[in-house]
Image (cartoon, rainbow, N blue to C red):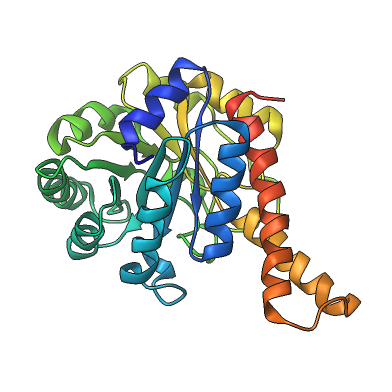
Amino acid sequence: MLASLKEVCEIAKKNHAAVGSFNTPNLECLLAVLGAAEKLNVPVIIAHAQCHEDVSPLDKIGRVMAELARHASVPVCVHLDHGEDFDYCKRAIELGFTSVMIDYSTLPYEENVKGTKKVADYAHAYGVDVEAELGALPQREGGGESAANPEELYTKPELVKDYIARTGVDALAIAFGTAHGIYKTKPVLNMDIITQVRKLTDLPLVMHGGSGISHEEYREVIRRGISKINYYSYMAYEGYAAAKATIEEKSADFYHNLALNAQKAMYENALQTLKVFSGKK
């Protein structure tokens, strides 16, 4: 069933959990994530990142996402992840997405505020929730080089109240040491930032770059107030590894078998991840 970002985050909050947000740029990812959420009977967010436009165009995959969400047995938020401009967010809203993220986090503060407010005003007129980011991750969505001093990109708690008041966003992504992509070294998280920001707002707080940290760290960020965790890279890698093994073992001769094995591997990864996020065993 279709649900808003606020609704799935509220369910997670009541259960002292976090809702998982998974990028789903193809059908195998979608079926894996929705299957795992339905198995555990937990809400979930399926997301399309603008950087995946060349992998799967929004106008095509967005319709599939919305349709599968409507028929799911659990609450499903259909979310635009890291929208880079107003027009792309507008397209997602027109396709039936229930929330959009506008990411102006690398712009100067005042430009971030102005651009985010424009998206929020438009989205709210259609009953769509908006997430934005204050601070920035060392790597952009889709990977890239890490910043030399990632702490310079961390969210500044002193800006939080002003940012929320002036933009009107419904969820806030904060930066405290995670990064997008596959980690080359273990991330060092400054979890005190979560604690400081949580004291300043009741809005759902979001962790981007959610792949690749320990179960204990997941539980700690949730305990400190994170309501939504974005997760993709490590699940997608499991799909790749399964397809690669199928080819090397010469156990299948058709692409659909590769895709099915990749889907099964991603399902298992999503299942275990959602167990941690939801506190289920």
- The residue that appears at 57% across and 49% down in the rendered structure is 33
Q: Quadrant of residue 39?
A: top right
Which residue sits furthest bottom?
253
Q: Quadrant of residue 117?
A: top left
Question: Is 236 left, or right, of 2 in this rendering?
Answer: right
> Which quadrant would the C terminus be assigned to in this image?
top right
> Which quadrant would the N terminus be assigned to in this image?
top left
Question: Is 276 left, or right, of 144 in this rendering?
Answer: right
Question: Is 73 left, or right, of 135 in this rendering?
Answer: right
Question: Is 276 left, or right, of 141 in this rendering?
Answer: right
Whole-percent x and y of residue 80?
Answer: 34, 54
Whole-percent x and y of residue 220?
Answer: 60, 24
Would you place residue 278 above or below residue 249 in this image?
above
Residue 143 visible in this rendered orientation of the protein: no
Whole-percent x and y of residue 116?
Answer: 19, 48
- The residue that appears at 54% across and 32% down in the rendered structure is 190
